[in-house]
Image: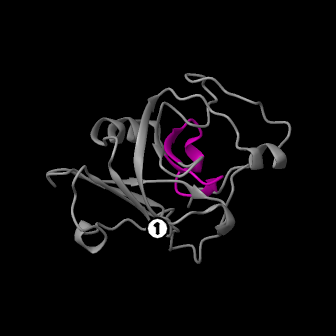
Amino acid sequence: MPALAQDGTTEFQAPVSSTVRNNASSFRMLQWQDYFDNTRGGAILVDLTSRALHYWSEDQSIYRLYPSSVPLSEDLTRRGRTSVVQKVVNPSWRPTPAMKERNPEWPDVVEGGAKDNPLGTRALYLSWTYYRIHGTHDTRKIGRRSSNGCVGLYNEHIEELFEMAKVGTQVLLI
């Protein structure tokens, strides 16, 4: 019997039958050559449809595939090429002006290291303002449309990616 969505989650689809289960993400390995000219500095591909993040090291000796959370809606989604511009351990979280307008009850800041910090234990800041690849304390979000624009990973996965990715790593969201 498939697990049912818990209260407060952002998405739920009933199984199509009692013998078929819905996967949160359709994982499949991809080839970097289909998306990048090279892997100089490493390469991160975020497939928003399959809710998966792919990472290739510069020398192509490392390939990782991680389940991810993606933006709640199309208007919160950004696609295209960017890069990692900063890496932060235990980042502080501040809601964007648009988030604060939608949710005025949210705190102005959640300090890094706090158990309820929406950015989790690590964050890769992208060249786009307010966009990050980060961890999450709420593991129910992974594999779902649940973010306000960022790409979320399990804390264990962002910690691994954080060690491999460099400032300058190229990123493509499709």
Residue 166 drawn above or below residue 145 = above
- Residue at 66 percent across and 52 percent down: it is 148
Residue 70 drawn above or below residue 119 = below
- Residue at 48 percent across and 49 percent down: it is 127
Residue 26 drawn above or below residue 152 = below
**In the figure, residue 26 lies in which quadrant?**
bottom left
Q: Give the camera-side residue of 171 and 164.
A: 171
Does dot 1 land on a helix, a strand or a loop? Answer: loop
Residues in magenta, as a range? 132-152
Rendered location of residue 170, percent (x, y) = 34, 55
Rendered location of residue 37, percent (x, y) = 24, 68
Q: Where is the N terminus found, in terms of image quarters?
A: bottom right
- Residue at 54 percent across and 54 percent down: it is 69
Q: Give the camera-side residue of 173 and 141.
A: 173
Q: Residues within 10 Å of mark 1 (few under 14, many from 20)?
A: many
Rendered location of residue 68, percent (x, y) = 48, 53
Q: As shown in the figure, which amino acid type bears the numbered disc 1?
A: Ser
Q: Is residue 135 magenta?
A: yes
Q: Residue lying furthest bottom in this view?
A: 16
Residue of label 1: 50
- Residue at 53 percent across and 52 percent down: it is 128
